Image (spheres, rainbow, N blue to C red):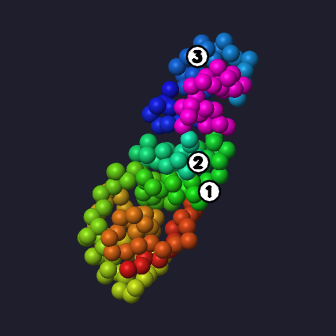
Amino acid sequence: FSIKKKAFITGTELIDSITQKFPEMRERNAAFSDFGLRNVLAYRLKNEFAFNGNLISQKGTLLTMPIVFDNYSETHTQFTLDDIKELANELNAPLSQQNFEALLEDSVRISADEFVSDRSILFTPRETDTLLEQICTEEYLSVKEITHFDILPSCGYNWNGFLLESYLSKYSRKFKLINNSFSTTDYSGAMVK
């Protein structure tokens, strides 16, 4: 299974994988619900794997929900907010601030609904910061006040408030983002010199 690739799988992924790769096994065990089959496998594989709720990992691996969300962003080149909500639902875990921030450690939010791996975006901090200095003439400026993004250099994606928030939080050399927290529904904060 893919546990070796990404450190964990969900019970749903396990059952889907068994159904796809070993349909005859699933047919022979049709009397078991998906949860029942997962529990049988948990018992049979208890010396090799840890079954913690709907999260399955190698035995002895410490996994917290922030680690799981960070791992998700590390192993996906692009994903949507719905994908993240589905993962949280599968894991019966809240999409808490801590989990959301862990997700953003290795990804960039490019719109209200889309995220990409930070390895797939091409920021030019020196040029971008120079242009942002023309916009932010005081010590700080609310990111909501920036509405014209067409002067910013190409980074492979269309600039918007979400992308600017991501840029300021991790890539800028002259500005930092000051905000209370990242939101699943909006962008916010101040761009501070």
- Say whether residue 43 is magenta: yes
Label 2, label 1: how far apart the Cα atoms are = 10 Å
Label 3 – label 2 distance at C-alpha:
31 Å
Mark 3 or 1: in front is 1
Residue 104 or residue 160, whichever sits in front: 104
The mark nearer the N terminus, 3 or 1, is 3
Q: Residues within 10 Å of mark 3 (few under 14, many from 20)?
A: few
Magenta segment: 36-61
In the rendering, which numbered label is found on residue 23?
3
For the point 44% across and 81% down, which residue is it?
141
Mark 1 Cα shell of 10 Å, populated few (<14), some (14-19), many (≥20): some
Choose between 93 and 141: the one closer to the eye. Answer: 93
From the top left corner, tell me how far across and down residue 116 is, in percent.
Answer: 41, 51
Label drawn at residue 96: 1
- Identify residue type, mark 3: Pro
- Whichever of labels 2 and 1 marks the residue nearer the N terminus, that label is 2
Image coords of residue 154 (percent x, y): 29, 63
What secondary structure is marked by label 1? Answer: loop
Q: Is residue 28 above or below residue 119?
A: above
Could you tell me which residue is drawn at 49 percent across and 49 percent down? 70
Where's residue 135, x and y in %? 35, 81
Residue farthest toward the bottom in the current orientation of the protein: 138
Q: Is residue 86 magenta?
A: no
Amino acid type, callout 2: Met
Q: In screen coordinates, is 73 left or right of 31?
A: left
Mark 2 vs 1: CB contact within 8 A: yes
Residue at image mark 2: 65
- Secondary structure beneath label 2: helix
The kind of residue on which mark 1 rests is Ser
